[in-house]
Image (cartoon, grey):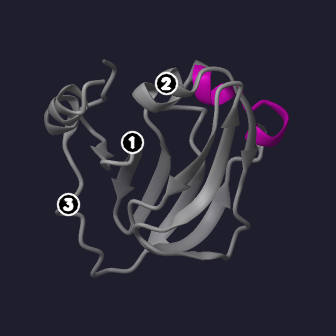
Amino acid sequence: MNTPKELKYSKDHEWVRVEGNTATIGITDFAQSQLGDVVFVDLPEAGRVIEKGKEFAVVESVKAVSDIYAPVSGVVKDVNGKLADAPETINQDAYGEGWIVVVEMQPEEDLSDLLDDAAYGEFCEKEGH
């Protein structure tokens, strides 16, 4: 399973790249492989406040429609507009060009419940994935 060490992971299969108070969020390689070919992404608008644990985007694939849950709270600063025309980018490069949003987190944002790469791998194994 592809889980870059520098990222944090949620139990809802989102990844987070934290740089200062900025978090880039996407779905994991595992999640995109379970979904199959991604055909549409419903993105939030820049400026929207997202709340940890709440749905903020939707990914539609040939198999399913899946809500994407915020692994952190904050204000959406940027959205990956490329996904509107090329949603399959999530399948091709989940941890790179397939990012979904960039969020400005509050300074006191608690990241302690996010998993490192090893713990996420163990979580997926225990879940029978």
Q: Quadrant of residue 60?
A: top right
Main secondary structure along the magenta-highlighted residues? helix
Q: Which mark is residue 34?
A: 2
Q: What type is the residue that disc 2 sits on? A: Gln
3 relative position to 42: left or right = left
- Where residue 70 sits in the image (x, y, percent)? 46, 61
Q: Residues within 10 Å of mark 1 (few under 14, many from 20)?
A: some
Residue found at x 30% / y 18%: 1
Is 48 within the magenta?
no
Q: Which mark is residue 113?
A: 3
- Where residue 84 sits in the image (x, y, percent)? 81, 42
Please tell me which residue lies in front, 15 or 53: 53
- Tell me where the magenta segment starts and ends, as one range: 83-91
* C-alpha span from label 2 to label 3: 23 Å
Query: Helix, strand, or loop for circle 1?
Result: loop
* C-alpha span from label 3 to label 1: 13 Å
Task: Tell me, yes or no, whether the two marked residues, 3 and 1, touch with CB atoms within 8 Å.
Answer: no
Please tell me which residue lies in front, 120 or 129: 129
